[in-house]
Image (cartoon, helix red, strand yellow):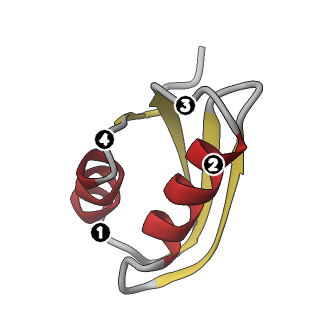
Amino acid sequence: MSTELNISGMTCGHCQTAVTKALKSVPGVQDAQVDLKTGKAVVEGQADVSALLAAVSEEGYTAQIHAAP
């Protein structure tokens, strides 16, 4: 299962790395790919969405579930 998130507040590679590490630390995450340019993250695994959002928030960024157009 994959979950797409919109991440706000990332401005550099360090931000991207911090968000990636935070997402990968959530139980149930198999992989996380964060794109600095688009501000999107794709998380693979069975992690609880609220835990993903909380992990990003704890790093100082804002995350929302990506809603398809």
Q: Secondary structure at mark 1?
A: loop
For the residue marked with disc 3, what is the amino acid? Met
Label 1, on which residue? 48
Which disc is residue 14 wearing?
Answer: 2
Task: Tell me which label, 4 or 2, sits earlier in the chain.
Answer: 2
Quadrant hosting residue 47: bottom left
Residue at 58% from the left image edge and 24% from the top image edge? 68
Q: Secondary structure at mark 3?
A: loop
In front: mark 4 or mark 2? 2
Q: Quadrant of the C terminus?
A: top right
Residue at 51% from the left image edge and 31% from the top image edge? 6
Residue 41: x, y in percent? Answer: 61, 46
Q: CA distance from mark 3 to mark 1?
A: 22 Å
Residue 33: x, y in percent? Answer: 71, 58
Crowding at dot 3, Cα within 10 Å, few <14 / some 14-19 / many 20+, comes out as some
Q: CA distance from mark 4 to mark 2?
A: 12 Å
Q: Secondary structure at mark 4?
A: loop
Crowding at dot 4, Cα within 10 Å, few <14 / some 14-19 / many 20+, comes out as some
For the residue marked with disc 4, what is the amino acid? Gly
Give whichever of 22, 32 is nearer the camera. 22
Q: Secondary structure at mark 2?
A: helix
Q: CA distance from mark 4 to mark 1?
A: 19 Å
Label 3, on which residue? 10
Label 4, on which residue? 60
Quadrant hosting residue 46: bottom left
For the residue marked with disc 2, what is the amino acid? His
In the rendered image of this protein, does residue 54 appear above or below residue 39?
below
Q: CA distance from mark 4 to mark 3?
A: 9 Å
